[in-house]
Image (cartoon, rainbow, N blue to C red):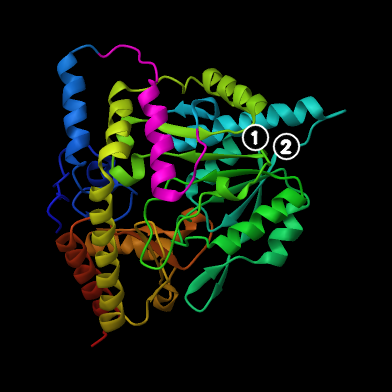
């Protein structure tokens, strides 16, 4: 493992991934957070804040706006982010809920009579919290299933163009969870053109943007939007720097009127108060931890290569999809002759390895595997999976 990437045994630390009831006694490769200690500059910044000794209500200082703006300009070529078009909240899912609330209010205000639900178009399979958020906010899901070609997911352009005609919002996950697609510049440009032509608002969740594999590059949706302000972007340092529990996320909103409406929704839903530790951690992450993140990406990719080679050698009936980013592997288990949900249940019960079944993401036949752990943990888990499948199918 890299010199600055430190694995931590999280068992017994009250973390959801390792200590929740269903995870007890297993190797948990499910919940999307990492088993690595936060980078040293983050811990040092938090220690300085701790030493201050007072943890009352906090404002967002200019340093946070500057850190976000400078990071995305320097790292991803996204220039022009400023304080006037940023909002802060606790996490990306509450941000999405607040944006839906603001867009629903806009739709109701413009309707001459009774207003239909806000119709949200998104690709499936999809991050499971998208489904919950759409339902909880009284919106209507319009799903456009991605299509499998070879061992790679692609966009069904005919389907998405057709369904965009009757939707209000396009909810994009860039890069995509759970399939690991890093949308290409050409794909994003075509999507932007479709949404502009059909007058859809684009809400882009870019929380996984820092994880890309060699040969693949994240493109911020905002860099393709030109002068059109009919979009917003949700981002957070939480996923990349393993600080999700500190509750700090950012929304980029270029439209001033919508900025005020989303800010109001954040206030109504009481998700605009921030943890002081999250604020200082974000500044340290974006200002001081680029090299740490580079090393982390190499480790994640190494874990992916190990999984790819191990499955090819010992479990060729399982198909690992061509992952391009995130730290989430997506594996087709249909050859086992049981649902992904049943397989995951049996695997957890009998082999003590915990994975996510694809039914929770809106499709069948797949499991999601979290690669953000130590090589030793991953190797042990893969060994247990291999032994279990060989035992029930008498392989070898």
On the picture, is 169 further left or further right than 79? right
On the picture, is 247 further left or further right than 93? left
On the picture, is 385 further left or further right than 90? left
Which residue sits furthest bottom?
Answer: 396
Q: Residue 244 placed where, x, y %? A: 33, 37
Q: With respect to residue 160, does 151 lie above or below?
A: below
- How crowded pointer 2 is (Cα within 10 Å; few <14, some 14-19, many 20+) is rated as some
Quadrant holding the C terminus: bottom left
Q: With respect to residue 343, does 178 lie above or below?
A: above
Q: With respect to residue 122, does 265 lie above or below?
A: above
Residue located at (16% from left, 31% from top): 44
Residue 56 colored magenta? Answer: yes
Using the image as rendered, state which of residue 6 and residue 288 is in the foreground.
Answer: 288
Q: Residue 113 placed where, x, y %? A: 87, 28
Using the image as rendered, state which of residue 351 and residue 124 is in the foreground.
Answer: 124
Magenta-drawn segment? 55-81
Q: Which mark is residue 117?
A: 2
Q: Secondary structure at mark 2?
A: loop
Residue located at (47% from left, 46% from top): 206
Q: Is residue 372 visible to us here?
A: no
Q: Which mark is residue 138?
A: 1
Using the image as rendered, state which of residue 138 and residue 307 is in the foreground.
Answer: 307
- How crowded pointer 1 is (Cα within 10 Å; few <14, some 14-19, many 20+) is rated as some
Residue 205 colored magenta? Answer: no
Q: Which mark is residue 67?
A: none
Q: CB atoms at circles 2 and 1 under 8 Å apart?
A: yes
Residue located at (83% from left, 30% from top): 111
Real-space CA distance between mark 2 and mark 1, rounded to the nearest whole angstrom: 7 Å
Q: Earlier in the sequence, mark 2 or mark 1?
A: 2
């Amino acid at each position: 493992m890299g010199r600055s990437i430190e694995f931590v045994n999280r068992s017994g630390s009250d973390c959801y991934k390792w200590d929740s009831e269903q995870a007890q006694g297993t190797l948990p490769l499910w919940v999307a957070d990492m088993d690595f200690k936060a980078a040293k500059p983050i811990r040092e910044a938090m220690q300085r804040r701790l030493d201050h000794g007072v943890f009352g209500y906090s404002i967002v200082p200019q340093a946070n706006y500057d850190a976000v703006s400078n990071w995305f300009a320097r790292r991803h070529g996204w220039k022009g982010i400023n304080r006037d078009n940023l909002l802060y909240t606790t996490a990306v899912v509450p941000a999405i809920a607040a944006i839906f609330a603001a867009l629903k209010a806009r739709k109701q205000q413009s309707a001459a009579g009774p207003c239909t639900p806000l119709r949200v178009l998104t690709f499936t399979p999809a991050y499971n919290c998208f489904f919950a958020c759409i339902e909880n906010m009284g919106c209507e899901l319009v799903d456009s299933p991605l299509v499998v070609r070879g061992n790679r997911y692609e966009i069904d352009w005919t389907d998405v163009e057709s369904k965009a005609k009757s939707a209000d919002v396009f909810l994009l996950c860039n890069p995509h969870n759970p399939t690991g697609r890093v949308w290409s510049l050409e794909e994003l440009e075509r999507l932007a053109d479709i949404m502009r032509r059909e007058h859809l608002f684009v809400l882009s969740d870019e929380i996984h943007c820092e994880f890309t594999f060699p040969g693949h590059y994240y493109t911020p949706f905002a860099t393709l939007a030109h002068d059109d302000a009919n979009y917003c972007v949700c981002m957070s340092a939480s996923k990349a720097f393993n600080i999700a529990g500190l509750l700090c996320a950012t929304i980029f909103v270029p439209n001033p009127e919508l900025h005020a409406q989303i800010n109001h929704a954040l206030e109504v839903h009481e998700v605009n108060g921030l943890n002081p530790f999250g604020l200082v951690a974000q500044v340290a992450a974006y200002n001081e931890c680029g090299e740490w993140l580079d090393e982390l990406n190499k480790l994640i990719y190494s874990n992916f290569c190990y999984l790819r080679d191990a499955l090819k050698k010992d479990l060729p009936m399982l198909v690992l999809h061509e992952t391009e980013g995130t730290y989430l592997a997506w594996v087709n288990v249909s050859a086992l002759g049981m649902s992904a949900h049943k397989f995951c249940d049996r695997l957890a019960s009998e082999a003590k390895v915990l994975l996510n079944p694809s039914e929770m993401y809106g499709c069948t036949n797949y499991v999601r595997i979290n690669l953000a752990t130590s090589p030793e943990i991953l190797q042990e888990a893969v060994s247990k999976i291999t032994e279990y499948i060989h035992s029930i199918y008498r392989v070898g």
